[in-house]
Image (tube, helix red, strand yellow):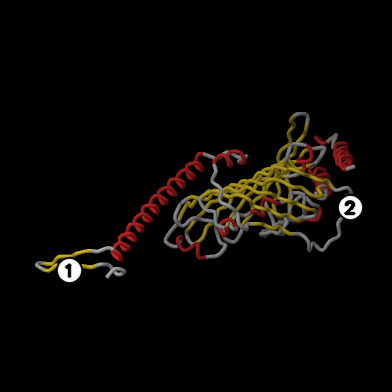
């Protein structure tokens, strides 16, 4: 039943797009937005593995930079280093309409405390391009009839590949607002599904942009598989650039049997991030197996430098511990062993505190 439902939807949009190459922009938008309304309610639930990687570089800093950590939940950075590298691996569970549970199981990198992980913008990794807005209602998305009034659109490219036609459409907000994005999306004619989505916006202290690639296999055609987020934060003469990567591998996808308009007050939508007792797991073999996006050379350098610094700290700590043990032994000996001291013609004997 579920397979027939998806095939029926796909055939409907394919039949509507036989003459797609001659369609004007308004017709393309109408078909795309009608399809988006149906694709938005296509998935009942899924379970997936989610890998993320964070790279942060401090581009400019002054004397005030070292006090940044005093501002709670402001920006992810390392006061003692110019660069930060963090990798996480966990599971992502989704239930219709917009309920997400992200459970981080393993973490490695240069900053692995819970408060550091909470600074990663995981909310970008559950953006639904077919929705009216994002799950946390931060942005109005441009692919729905209800939000079309907030954007202007421009067809910038039309091309064919493997007997399929694709349209690239730019969108810009009609007025400046933090809830409105600027960017572009690529549409596949016939199915009118999104192939690629790019958005950018501004926050109080930061500029950001993000890109989403949709899947190319069976039902993942309608789900995101790759994310990349760029963020640059400027404050008080300091500048910090961040890049966040994510890859989703779906394990169990269930389709909705009945696609009907959902009348809801939107009180059940949530995104939950589980960070309790996340183990730091530095096994390189594990991360080679579970890392779908290879490390760049600069990231490898950051990891090597961090491991070297950790080894130096461990060696220094071991030396300090050994020194403390020797001092303790000497103190214990003085407490129980006999000792003699000479001063000129005088000899003084001491039998220890516990052996007077």
Q: Position of residue 66 (x, y in %)?
A: 45, 61
Q: Residues within 10 Å of mark 1 (few under 14, many from 20)?
A: few
Q: Which residue shows up at 27% across the image and 67% down it?
A: 352
Are circles 2 and 1 on residues that touch, CB within 8 Å?
A: no
Left or right of 162? Residue 319 is left
Image quadrant holding the C terminus, namely bottom left
Figure quadrant of residue 167: top right
The residue at the far top in this view is: 162
Task: Quickly name the residue at label 1.
Answer: 348
Front-lying residue, 132 or 217: 217
Front-lying residue, 26 or 233: 233
Image quadrant holding the N terminus, namely top right
Task: Indicate which disc residue 260 carries.
Answer: 2
Left or right of 311? Residue 225 is right
Q: Position of residue 45 (x, y in %)?
A: 79, 49
Work out whether mark 2 precedes mark 1 in sequence or the reverse, and give the earlier one.
2
Q: Which residue shows up at 50% across the image and 39% down it?
A: 297
- CA–CA distance in space, label 2 to label 1: 99 Å
- The secondary element bearing badge 1 is classed as strand
- The secondary element bearing badge 2 is classed as loop
Q: Position of residue 59 (x, y in %)?
A: 48, 51
Figure quadrant of residue 185: top right
Is 164 drawn above or below residue 354 in the view shown? above
Left or right of 140? Residue 207 is left
Front-lying residue, 105 or 304: 105
């Amino acid at each position: 039943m579920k397979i027939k439902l998806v095939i029926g939807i796909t055939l409907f949009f394919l039949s509507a797009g036989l003459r797609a190459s001659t369609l004007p922009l308004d017709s393309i938008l109408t078909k795309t937005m009608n399809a988006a309304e149906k694709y938005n309610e296509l998935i009942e639930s899924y379970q997936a593995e989610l890998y993320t990687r964070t790279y942060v570089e401090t581009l400019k800093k002054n004397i005030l930079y070292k006090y940044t950590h005093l501002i709670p939940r402001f920006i992810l950075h390392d006061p003692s280093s110019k660069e930060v590298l963090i990798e996480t691996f966990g599971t992502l569970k989704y239930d219709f309409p917009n309920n997400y549970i992200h459970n981080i199981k393993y973490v490695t990198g240069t900053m692995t405390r819970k408060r550091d992980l909470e600074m990663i913008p995981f909310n970008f990794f559950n953006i639904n391009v077919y929705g009216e807005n994002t799950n946390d209602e931060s942005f109005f998305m441009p692919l729905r009839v209800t939000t079309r009034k907030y954007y202007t659109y421009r067809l910038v490219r039309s091309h064919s590949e493997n007997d399929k036609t694709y349209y690239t459409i730019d969108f810009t907000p009609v007025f400046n607002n933090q809830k409105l994005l600027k960017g572009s999306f690529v549409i596949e004619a016939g199915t009118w599904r999104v192939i690629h989505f790019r958005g950018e916006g501004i926050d109080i202290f930061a500029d950001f942009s993000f890109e989403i690639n949709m899947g190319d296999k069976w039902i993942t055609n309608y789900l995101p598989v790759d994310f990349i987020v760029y963020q640059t934060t400027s404050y008080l003469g300091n500048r910090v650039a961040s890049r966040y990567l994510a890859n989703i591998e779906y394990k169990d996808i269930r389709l909705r049997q009945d696609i009907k308009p959902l009348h809801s007050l939107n009180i059940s939508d949530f995104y939950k991030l589980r960070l309790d007792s996340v183990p730091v797991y530095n096994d390189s073999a594990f991360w080679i197996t579970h890392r779908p996006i290879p490390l760049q050379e600069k990231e490898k350098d950051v990891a090597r430098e961090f491991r070297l610094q950790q080894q130096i700290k461990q060696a220094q700590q071991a030396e300090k511990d050994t020194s403390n043990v020797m001092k303790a032994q000497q103190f214990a000996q003085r407490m129980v062993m006999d000792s003699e001291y000479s001063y000129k013609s005088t000899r003084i004997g001491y039998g220890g505190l516990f052996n007077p």
